[in-house]
Amino acid sequence: MKKIVLKTAAKAVAVVLLLTGCSERMVSVESQTETIEKTDAVSSATINKTAVQREDVEQAADALVSRQEDGQLVLSHKYGQTVIPSNPERIVCIKLEDLALALGVDLEACQIFEGYYLEEQIKELGIGSIAVDEEANTINLEQVLSYEPDLILLRDSFESSVYEELSKIAPVAPFDLKDTEVSLLAMGKILGMEEQALLRLEKYHEKLNAAKETLSAVSDSETAMLRVMKKEVRLYPASSNDMSRFLYADLGLNPDPMAEEYDSKESLAISMELLPELTAEHIFLVAGYGSTGGSSDSEAKKRLEEMKQDPLWQEIPAVKNGNVYEVDSRLWLAHGILAVEKKTEDVLAYMAEK
């Protein structure tokens, strides 16, 4: 802006006053414009990132599903390949309930247990029960057989012998639950529900983006996720573990510096002596073993109560400020679309008002 030199002091004062008022208004407008531009840039970046991610997910799902010359779909998976029957009507689901329910699959039977974050939904739908021994990682095959399935959806965390036994009952479609989005879309493909799967993923990202926007006011605050077990305490890393990754990658929270350091560590264990070095203003605290807990959960919770009395624990900023949030291990150690959405609801409930 050119400076205008005036010949009289009176004119100079008048112009300065005028320009000062204009300048303040211009700064205000420029500030608003800058804020809008930044917001637009973030929104645009989010949209572009989502588009790229969606394309990657679709390509990965396409790689899992092929079609034979006779038109039958074939699913490639950890154990080999499965020819998918046309229009399966009696579907049994084992440890993939999250994806199946998110997609709206009509299930004949599935796993259900007390305290399961999907327990209420499963009961409301009147779905039958399949017993799974979490510690032995085995399935009640007689129960599966009793439902006379024509397709079995299976999480691929079981030994190959379990897959082989189930395959004697009906074709088995295994999926990697940790690769949530790809598995959801591939499941949609083999069940003739690809469009529903794409729409569900879109809804999923809309929920996460809305939560991220709500949490933007506290996104600069450092956050950490700790897990108390029988014999150790774990600090979950910022990006290398999918249990905690959603907090930072999807919800935009700021990881504690130590959580970033743990991205490169083989062990997640953290000593009591190191805990006071956590500068996190918010801590999500899990005590237990999720769906495999049993008696081990009780021991983990006992350890947590002992930790709370330790002076080292009381030195952590989040502890001092009352910002330690004890969350359900059966949900927070779970994988899946619905699991992340429910965990996000927890985050909003604890942090949105901070």
Image: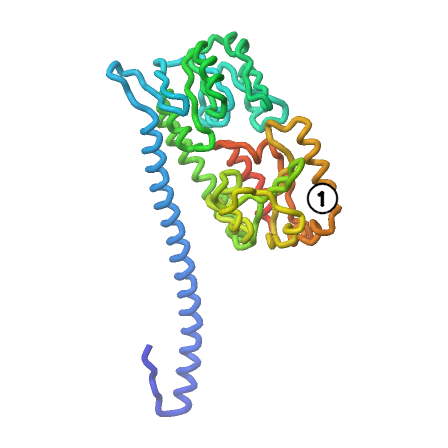
Q: Amino acid at mark 1?
A: Met
Quarter of image, res 191:
top left
Quarter of image, res 205:
top left
Give the image location of residue 46, x and y in percent.
39, 47
Give the image location of residue 143, x and y in percent.
54, 10
Look at 43% across and 86% down and name the residue there.
13
Q: Establish if 265 lies above or below 229.
A: below
Q: Establish if 252 lies above or below 330.
A: below
Quarter of the image with the N terminus in it:
bottom left
Q: Establish if 202 lies above or below 124.
A: below
Spot the residue most to the bottom.
Answer: 8
Spot the residue most to the front.
Answer: 266
Spot the residue most to the left.
Answer: 69
Density class for disc 1 (Cα within 10 Å; few <14, some 14-19, many ≥20) is some
Give the labeled residue for mark 1: 307
Front-lying residue, 285 or 265: 265
Q: Establish if 24 lies above or below 198.
A: below
Q: How many marks?
A: 1
Give the image location of residue 287, x and y in percent.
65, 37
Look at 40% across and 61% down and name the residue there.
34
Please, which colouring scheme is shown?
rainbow
| 174 lies left or right of 119 | left
Secondary structure under tag 1 reads helix
| 232 lies left or right of 205 | right
Give the image location of residue 184, x and y in percent.
42, 28
Look at 70% across and 51% down and name the residue there.
312
